[in-house]
Each structure stands twice: as structure tokens, then as C-alpha cells.
Image (cartoon, grey):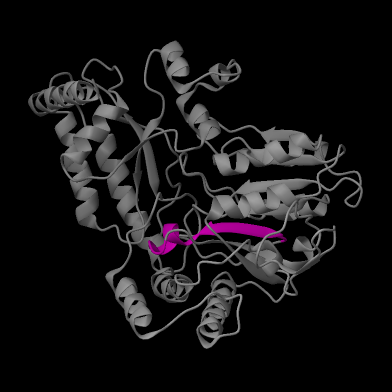
Amino acid sequence: MGGAIYPESLIRVHTEFLNRSILGNTHSVSNSSKLSLKCADEARLAVLTHFSASSEYTVVFTANASAALKLVAEAYPFTGGSSLVIGADSHNSVHGIREFATYRSARVCYVPSTSTGGFDIPTAKNMLLRHRPRSRDLAPSLFVLTAQSNISNSKPPISITEYAASLGYHTVVDGAALAPTSIINISEYPIDAMAVSFYKMFGYPTGVGALIVKKSFLAQLKRPWFAGGNVDVVQVPGTIVTRAHHIHEQFEDGTINYLQLPAITSGLRFLSAYLPFLPLRLSSLLHYLTSSLSKLRHDSSGRPVVQILSQTPKKRLRSVGEQADTGSILSLLFFDPSGGMIPNSFIEYAATTQNISLRTGCMCNPGGAAAILGIVEEMGQLYPGVTLADFEDKMGRELGVVRISLGLASNFQDVWKVIQFATSIGQERKREALWNQWIESQRAEIGQAM
């Protein structure tokens, strides 16, 4: 979820390519630059093919999915009559779009999250209908769908973009969490743009994402600036600017990551070989993990060790090609023998002693976190300048969850190890020993800081 484990074969193939090739900046006509441009075009085609994008689409390479969403946000022609509709259970990179919308006096409308994340489809449709654009030309409006939540594990149907488009909205999909484990046919839906990060999909390289976007949608965006690489002629002094010929170049600021783009082509080829089988594999692993964790009890009191907060699949997959109705993560809390919450920071520390990489906190998704933690009302009472420490002090506990993420590289041994770790938290002697180690490590850190 946060970053896939990169395959050894991908690193080897890319390293061998770099060892025998000389690549240059794509903004030139030297042989090395021509090779870079050829590799970039191959990567662009590989992305379009992977997502079954028609000739209506092109690919803008960015630093990551967040940068792809920002490209849309800063250039979308919001006006005083426009609406921005987004789900509360979304990443901060989606919530950040509201800054540009608000600056241009557009309405920002949130689809509320259910108590288990995601949103209720009739509620979402009602929200879209109430705030529909009166005129797509005079007051363009935007619907941004989080295709899979990175904290609640919800997976709203992408088909809701059809309803939004029928009302006159432009539709953008945050596909960062969905793309690593799901087959997405972007041309099946009226999607104007979708953002992804490749390191989430196959681990390497970091620093490269993409906006898969309709050319007609790009043509309607108004960029607030220009830079090297996306212009043909700039009058200096003066005001005349002629943009680059290819529309995707107009949105790629400066030099693209040309040394890494060949790895995108290889990585997509690698992922495509496994993707048809991945949902079935992850469904089996997730079912075993959730059922095992749910049964754990403290040896001293018999109370549950964990509480699973994220959505779990409603159905078991039985054959290759089926798609899961949720993602493959678990967001949960650990509890002590008396039923009190164990600090997430302790769980994270204890996991590191077993070489288990967990993430704790709100996962940059405050709306989804508030929903599954049951603190939506308290979220509404926040005030300007509030810090996380202030919020936690008011709530009297650490905020956030423990997240366990399964993906391309996960196997049964990984799941078994997590279950054994959680079992040890329910064993008083082992838990107390880890707690004492954690307290000592905190004292040592304070001492070093002083």
C-alpha cells in the first residue's frame, strides 16, 4: 500500500539496460536524447495499454500520484458557480484540490463516509445531483473518486463516474491504491483522468507517477505557469508563450525522469503477468488473516486482542479473473487485557523487533480515519491552528490505526508471521517484556535529544 517490494528481476533488467546504454535529456536531438525519447514513448504506450486506454487518452508523467492530482487541481477552470465533489474517505492529495477550488470561489461538497469507510451510493448520487453544474461551459464542475481507500479498504464502484458524467461533471479518479492489485479498464467508464504511482504498483522506481488523461480534458485545463520542456517559444521581455506541440509535453514541467522510464515498461510487463491471479491470491491470504486475528484472546482475561475497523470482503473469490469487492489491507486497533487501547506507537515498535513493517496513524486520510474511529463529530470541532498533539490530548489517546497491507509480494509466511506477532501481544509475559523495552528505548531517545 505504501510501497511495493521491488522484484529482483526488474532491478537486474533495468541495471543491465543502463550499463549498456547512454541516455540524454529528451529536450535535445542527440543520439542519447533520441534513445531517451524512444524509451519515454514506449513507457507511455505501455501505460496506455496496461489500463486499456483508447486513443482518446495520453499519459503525463509526474513525480507521483499526488503531483498528477495537483496538475488537474491547479489548472482546472473553477469559477464561482463551479462545484468540487469529493468523498470524505480520500487521501490528502485529493482533499488538497479544495484549496484551488476555494481560491476560485467554487463550492466544495463532501460525500460523507459511512462508519466503515467509503460512501453510500444513493447518498453520493444525491450529493452529485444537488450540486450538478448548471452549465458545463460556464461553471465546469469536478467529481474526484477515490477508487480504493488506503485506510478503510473500501472500493466504491467506478461506475458511479457514469452518473456523475451524465450530470455534466468532469470525472477524475485517484487510482493510486487500486492499481497495484486490480485490473482497470479506463475506457469502460467516462473517466477524464486517473492518477497512479508506479512504486505502489511494482516497487521501482520511486519518483515516477502518471496522469492517464483524455486529450480533450487536458485541452480545457489552464496552466498557471510554464517551464522548460513544455514551451516552444517564450518572448522575453514580453508576454507571448507558445506551448509545446504535443499536449502531454505542455504538462510535463522541466525534464522528465528519463533514466527511470524504461523501468516502467518492464515493471508493467512484470505486474501484468501476475495481475489476473493476484485478487484470488490476496483474497485467500486476507480471509485467513482476518479470521485468525479475530479469534485472538488475551491469556489473562479472555478479551479480544484486536478490533478490525476496515471493511472486509463480503465474498470469497473462487476463480482467476474475479475482482474483489474490497482492497487487501486491514486497519485495526490493539487492546490490553482490560479492554483499553494499546498505543499504536508501541505496536509499531514491537513489530519492528520482529522485522515486520507496519504503518500506524491516519494514513494521510483524515476523513476515512475519523469515520472508522468514530470521531467524525470531534473532527468537526477542530479550530484553526490545531495540531495533532492538541487533537490527541483532547481525545485522551493516540489517534490513528495499525495498518497491515498485502500486495504483489505477500505470501503465507508473511501472514503467519503477523498472526504470531499479534498472538504475542495477547500473551502477558511477552507483552510486558516488549513494553519495558519500548519504555527504555524512549528514555534513551530523550536522553540523546537532551
Q: Which of 98 and 380 is in front in this view?
A: 98
Position of residue 229 measured from the top left corner of the image (x, y, whole percent): 65, 68
Residue positioned 53% across, 18% down in the render: 386
Residue 267 in the image: above or below residue 120: below
Which part of the image, by quadrant, shows the C terminus? top left
Position of residue 306 measured from the top left corner of the image (x, y, whole percent): 29, 30
Residue found at the far bottom of this picture: 31
**In the rendered view, does 442 fall on the left or right side of 109?**
left
Viewer can see residue 360: yes
Q: Which of 98 and 49 is in front in this view?
A: 98
Position of residue 242 measured from the top left corner of the image (x, y, whole percent): 81, 68
**In the rendered view, does 370 fall on the left or right side of 172?**
left
Is residue 99 rendered magenta in the image? Answer: no
Q: What are the residue bounds of the magenta stretch?
A: 190-205
**In the rendered view, does 205 fall on the left or right side of 449?**
right
Q: Nearer the viewer, residue 417 or 316?
A: 417
Position of residue 4 measured from the top left corner of the image (x, y, whole percent): 36, 57
Residue positioned 62% across, 58% down in the render: 194
Residue positioned 24% across, 24% down in the render: 449
Count of numbered circles on the image: 0
**In the rendered view, does 212 fall on the left or right side of 368?**
right
Residue 376 in the image: above or below residue 54: above
Viewer can see residue 422: no
Residue 394 in the image: above or below residue 9: above
Query: Which corner quadrant of the image does residue 346 belong to?
Result: top left
Is residue 191 rendered magenta in the image? Answer: yes
